[in-house]
Amino acid sequence: MNTPIHIIGGGMAGSEASWQIAEAGLPVILHEMRPTQKTFAHQTEGLAELVCSNSFRSDDSEQNAVGLLHWEMRQANGLIMHTADRHSLPAGGALAVDRDTFSAEVTARLAAHPNITIERSELEGLPPERWGSTIIATGPLTSPALTKAILGETGEDALAFFDAIAPIVYIESVNMQKAWFQSRYDKGETEEDRTAYLNCPMTEAEYNAFLDALLASDKTEFKDWEKGTPYFEGCLPIEVMASRGRETLRFGPMKPVGLTNPHNPTEKPHAIVQLRRDNALGTLFNIVGFQTKMKYGAQREVLRLIPGLEEAEFARLGGIHRNTFINSPRLLDASMRLKSRPDIRFAGQITGVEGYVESAAMGLLAGKLAAAEALGQTLQAPPPTTAVGALITHITGGAEAKTFQPMNVNFGLFPPVPDIKSGRRGRRDRYKAYTDRAKADFTAWLDEKAKAA
């Protein structure tokens, strides 16, 4: 008889991982602490409860990376996506669900599966090694006891603070007639180091207009269960810094020193906004020091006041909320296993992905990888040209460990498609090329997996 694979957490990722392993013919023990231990956000004891929005976002698999992720998960026998389809609500081009009936069906199907045992109790430490293969999928509301245990194993400084997340821009949408590449004082031993930052200069009038708009912008309010969790003092929201004085930003992330504007070398900028590469491909750049709690609409308006970003397109907007996630690029191997404890995999939002679908997708992949390993099969993650593959590649090495923050799936995580023109005019052709390639490559990956089984 096969040894059970243990899953910690019955959210989107844990539910999907359990289903994938059980469908592979292996026994699963799914540990969910609710209702024995409640959280501030959950309202029920149901599995895969949607605690925030009821939207799975765009369902367009030809022009949207999230819709493509939907498509891939359906092809891979994803419990979450097939259940969402059965409980969908009218939402235009998006996929929204009845959250109560959705969770109820996921719970019922897992409870009825002959290979799944559900245990309602809290795990207060790391899984014991005698359990063997285990997946931790406890999400942003990981219990304090388990959080402490993870900290003890990984040596990371912190897991549960307010994440003040900086916006990320597609490099192709930056106006390079105004911006330029240069590190402060040309520091670095290589040309890549000396041109690691993208710089956007501001005149005094532009700086003051930006500051006024920033201070007047609509901000998000904290939920009751988030209140009391501290900011990282070294990672304050930009509007908090701005509120400390009109010159604070010019002596902080927007200081205009050590840089020369090649477009206008004789004029000294009053302030400079820097962007730093966020992925190995160089397609995404985060705005340095611009972590923010502005509402999304306000972010687009305010950030497009920055010279060079007037037509910026965002792979991720900034945000601020309590979160629990590990530094996956530093801690996990390519199969989502903890390097210091290979018997433990992590999945879902705790790995540094954002969103219901992304969390479920990482649960799906962790489940398939764990099942293949238990069955003595060789299974690699899907290639980075696919949506699932792009996510796993990003969190296990594609992202910069020093600046790692939670990320939604987006086309900036994919290797570029050759010979497709850039810019807004070519965007539809480019996105279609991404999705066509991804569907072909994901189908080939599933075929290879089937042959190995």
Image (cartoon, rainbow, N blue to C red):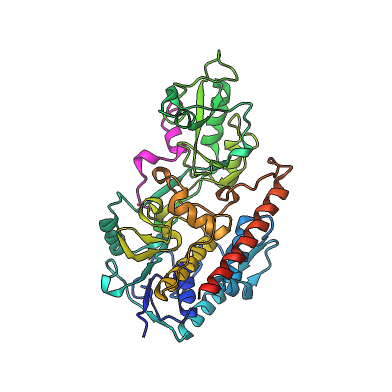
Where residue 220 sits in the image (x, y, percent)?
50, 48
Position of 77 compared to 234: left or right?
right
Position of 443 compared to 405: left or right?
right
Residue at position x 37%, y 45% from top? 231
Position of 306 compared to 107: left or right?
right
Position of 343 compared to 386: left or right?
left
Instruction: Name the quadrant of the N terminus.
Output: bottom left
Q: Tell me if residue 440 is in the magenta stretch.
A: no
Can see residue 168?
A: yes
Residue at position x 39%, y 40% from top? 235
Front residue (pair 262, 50): 262
Residue at position x 56%, y 15% from top? 265
Where residue 137 sits in the image (x, y, percent)?
41, 66
Residue at position x 44%, y 73% from top? 371
Q: Tell me if residue 249 is in the magenta stretch.
A: yes
Numbered-mark total: 0
351 in relation to 202, above or below: below
Region of the chain picked out in magenta, as a range: 227-250
Front residue (pair 298, 9): 9
Front residue (pair 244, 402): 402
Where residue 97 sits in the image (x, y, percent)?
60, 69
Can see residue 320?
A: no
Where residue 149 sits in the image (x, y, percent)?
27, 61
